[in-house]
Amino acid sequence: MFRSTKRRTAGRRNFEEIASYGSGASNVKSGLYSQRLSFYDIPPLEEITLEEFEMWAIDRLKILIEIESGTARGKSAREIESSIKPMLMKYLPLNSSGNDMLNERRKDHYSHYILRLVFCRNEELRKKFIKNETLLFKARYNALQPKEQHEFINHYHDKLNWKYIDKDEKNALFDDLYAATGTVIRTMLMVDGGETISNDQLKQHIRVKENFIKLPFEKVPALVAGRQLYLSKGDVYVPSTLQLNLLAVEFQESLNKQLMRTFQAIPRLEEDDRLLPLLNHLANNFSSLQFDSYEADSTQASDIHAGSITTTAITKHYPLCATHLQRNMSHNSHLKYTGRQQLGLFLKGIGLSVDEALKFWAYQFTKNGSGMTMEKFNKEYKYNIRHSYGLEGGRTNYKPWDCATILSKPKPGKGEYHGCPYRDLSADSLVSNLNEMGISDQSEINTVLEDVNRREYTVACTRVFELTHKEQMANQKNAEGLHISHPNLYFDRSRQLERGENKTSVAESVAVN
Ligand code: SF4
């Protein structure tokens, strides 16, 4: 996709020049990565490869997509935090020590700045980026040890102008601090832990765990108006429990200003023909990046063959796009080109071999009354099916289409059934499909229709997945609520949940016997 060799171009800064901007150019040497968390207020200046540029951005995007989807589905901040935890460990770890510590911080820093380039272009994208990055920032701050939180605040002392009170001042003011902030601290602790806290436990908590900062009262008007803080001589005393909200506001304001600056610098960047296609690709396809494993899971594919893929044992795991295509193909004994591509690659992705695919399509197209002979089928369709498995022509092994690809194709015309039904079906038809999938509660249907009205089709699909797998997800502690961005991800997750349930019931029956 990109030239691997660097070239000199008039008007463009080249890496060698940037690297020679003096000793301050090295982000690592400058101590930039001394903290796990960052306000990202110093831009990266070191050289990275185009592959790193792309992969790091994609990895961060996966996290932001998950946050965006969780928010759209009404998950609480706590639920989102726990759903992104394993993803953070996989895609964007930030350990406090270890051999990779600096590289992890560098990746975090660069990926944030690359996505600024993607998301600075209009108001809507900026808002989305700020909202999701702030949630990520809060989740990561919560994961820091109290000592690290303290160090982080001290590191940004000039920016935040926060001052921790010392032990003596805290002891002298303890009764006032307890009287003013005890209620709000108790409430926050109960939200986190869910247990009732006695007065003695609360006092002990404040004495040991709460580090108070002292700020001029005009810096936190909202908190002062709530009358939940101790105010003395023009200063308010804010406990650790409430500091994260203040930090988040600082983070948002700073990011907003910096995104505007990036936006103003974009015309200069657009002269760069190496980065522009990549940035456009990231912006256009950001909802499709979650599911990168299109190979059929061999442990699940053993029962996938021409005969089984029309049975409910298998079709109950299909997302609506696949159901819609297969149902109409079966009804009409035919499917037009784009639909054949979309369904054929989906079936390939769930594990249908090329021989079984030929049997399946041949049977469907020639079955009674269709008027098509086997000879005609072999002449007109066999080559294309083999081609999609990489056995003809240029021998490209085509991947199943993700939701973004499906949504980027022209909408289905008369007699066509490809596309995404959440976008392409009328409201009535969609509701009747939802009913068939077992969703009949009007308020649940309304939430799906609201997603559709906002054009958030993959969010609607994810919501439908959650509604139709509610019990299985509740029974399996480790079931992840991931965003659906690929029809094959829908299928695989649905089967995994079923297999998990079967395992549990087998284990239970063994235990009973
Ligand atoms: Fe299919 Fe994706 Fe639409 Fe769901 S959101 S129906 S998986 S295209």
Image (tube, grey):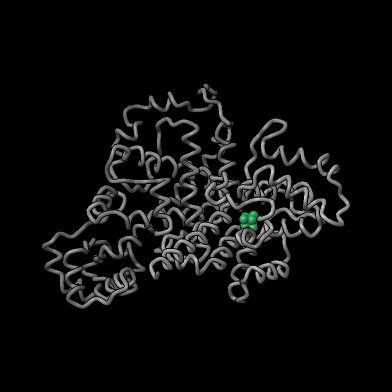
Q: Is residue 365 above or below residue 15?
A: below
Residue sticking out furthest to the front: 513
Residue 208 percent coordinates (x, y): 17, 64
Q: Residue at x 59, y 75 (%)?
A: 443
Instruction: Work out whether residue 456 can be spotted.
Output: no
Residue 332 relative to residue 142: left or right? right
What quarter of the picture does the C terminus occupy? bottom left
- Ligand 1, seen in the image, is in the quarter at bottom right
Residue 26 percent coordinates (x, y): 34, 31
Q: Residue at x 33, y 64 (%)?
A: 220
The count of marks equals 0
**Nearer to the camera, 90 or 228:** 90
**Nearer to the camera, 423 or 303:** 303
What quarter of the picture does the N terminus occupy? top right
Q: Residue at x 49, y 63 (%)?
A: 502
**Nearer to the camera, 116 or 142:** 142
Instruction: Work out whether residue 70 can be spotted.
Output: yes
- State which quadrant residue 184 falls in: bottom left
Q: Is residue 438 above or below residue 46?
A: below
- State which quadrant residue 377 falls in: top right
Residue 89 percent coordinates (x, y): 38, 48
**Nearer to the camera, 112 or 214:** 112
Q: Residue at x 48, y 39 (%)?
A: 55
Residue 265 percent coordinates (x, y): 51, 39
